[in-house]
Amino acid sequence: MLSILDYEAGNQTSVLHALQHLGIPGQVTARASDLFASSGIIFPGVGAAGQAMRELTNSGLARVLGDLVALGKPLLGICLGCQILLEQSEEGNVETLGLVNGSSKRFSNDLRDENDRLISIPHMGWNGLRLKRRNPLFKGVSPLAEFYFVHSYYVEPDPDLVLAYTRHGLEFCSVYGRDGLWALQFHPEKSGPAGLTILRNFYKYCRQAKFGDRTC
Amino acid sequence: MLSKRVIPCLDVRNGQLTKGVKFKGNLDIGDPVKMARRYYEQGADEIVFYDITASAEKRGIFLDVVERVAMNIFIPFSVGGGISTVADMRAVLRAGAEKISVNSAAVTNPHLISEGAEAFGSQAIVVGMDVKQTAVSAQIPSGYEIVIQGGRKRMGMDAIAWAVCCEQLGAGEICVNSIDADGTKEGYELNLTRTIADSVRIPVIASGGAGSPAHMLDALTKGRASAALIASIVHYGEYSISEIKDFLSAGGCKVRPLTDAAVAP
């Protein structure tokens, strides 16, 4: 069972629909007991970082997320979730969860694309990735696949954790993580078959992490 | 670099699909959820649904369609038609749409754009505008005038000025529909599309007049649009989305390739 974190800044229903389509058991929940009992956590998010952080802090979920990560519970951050796993965001200059070293920055207004036109902000639409390192999330995903992005801020995590880059006026980190803790700047639940493959790979990883030891 | 988007547009009346030519003589061609699913599998980058149901009491049928679409396609989709309040916007976004599209209601009440952007973010607000060519005047310096009610009512507003205004109010995208070209299948109004794309920084979607993939290539290159809206050229099976994308790609236009087969459970 995967748990989709329920708080007032999410696109939880879209993620749940994608899991249902894949036949993956999933639930939208904010209960700590559910979260600890599930094999993995999906941490979605849309909206502003400050608002989301207030929600997470007031509800106690910020602390629960910290405990889950400390315990090694597999976690997948999506979009705003990807940004607030880091320490700080330029969006309202807020302190964020600090579960991964790094911060979020705003796309600068004067950035230009390959055709020397000013970039649009938010970065919205389909864009590709330049994978820096192989990782289980992208197993079976074509290197040519594109993903759906909607964001005005981008992440700058610890360089050792960067897994993929994307270009929009500049090259920014679009995927980071290490085994069991990943974050995607794009929306896998809205990125067609390639995005669904990533969600399924995450579920496979979670199952192996939970039951793998017994079968060995 | 962002890919250019191919966006099929589905008109829905009483929960069923229609496709009008010059907004007249609509005829039923089927189930919107099935059609959306087909376009999703063919590689559509986004889908637009317009609710052209006349009566407000049948609104529930349409919201049910939106919910079923959200369960069946895993790409963004937007919803327009009959949206005139923030509450209307909230209802379709809750039902699972990523974006809402406002048209005539924004012309009569521009604050709808800023209220929507404030409540849901600019990325969720698309402003659709119907445009008709007219004589150049002090009031309409570009010769492109905003019209509503399918072109029957002229608003005395310059289309370029209105596009700039929409961007300032917080629109995330502008969909430019040429009433003169709509339904002709003779190509998009390229000059109009380009003039608006050069006047704003937000993405412009070209609409009205697509009769072939070559028309779409023109809109996305010469017209400088970020996306091309299509209807009849795909609804009647003349072209599939994948054939269109192959053509665009061969023409040097960057589009999202179809790399993976639809993922089954």
Image (tube, coloured by chain):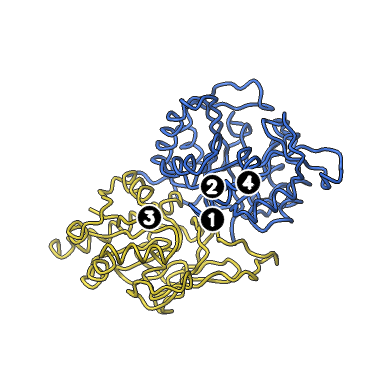
Chain colours: A yellow, B blue
Instruction: Check the image and report above or below for B211 versus B116.
Output: above
Element type at mark 4: loop
Q: Are marks 2 and 1 on the same chain?
A: no
User: Residue B131 location, x and y as percent?
Assistant: 73, 39
The residue that appears at 68% across and 30% down in the rendered structure is B150
Tag of residue A10: 3
Q: Chain of mark 4?
A: B
CA–CA distance in space, label 2 to label 1: 8 Å
Query: Do pointers 3 and 2 mark residues of a single chain?
Result: no
Q: Residue at x 64, y 54 (%)?
A: B167
Q: Secondary structure at mark 1?
A: strand
For mark 2, does the 10 Å Cα neighbourhood hold few (<14), some (14 to 19), or many (20 or more) residues?
A: many
Check if mark 3's residue and mark 4's residue have beta carbons within 8 Å: no
Judged left or right of residue A37, residue A97 is right
Judge if badges 3 and 1 mark residues of a common chain: yes
Within 10 Å of disc 1 (Cα), the crowding (few <14, some 14-19, many 20+) is many
- Which of discs 3 and 2 lies nearer the camera? The answer is 3
Amino acid type, residue under disc 1 in the picture: Trp
Q: Amino acid at mark 4?
A: Pro
Q: What chain letter is assigned to the residue under label 1?
A: A
Circle 2 is placed at which residue position? B45
- The answer to whether B76 is drawn above or below residue B184 in the figure is below
Looking at the image, residue A122 lies above or below residue B191: below
The residue to which callout 1 is attached is A126
Q: Position of residue B41 (x, y in %)?
A: 47, 41
The answer to whether the residue labelled 2 contacts the one labelled 1, judged by CB atoms less than 8 Å apart, is: yes
Q: Real-space Cα distance between discs 3 and 2?
A: 22 Å
- Comparing labels 4 and 1, the label whose residue is closer to the camera: 4
Q: Chain of mark 2?
A: B
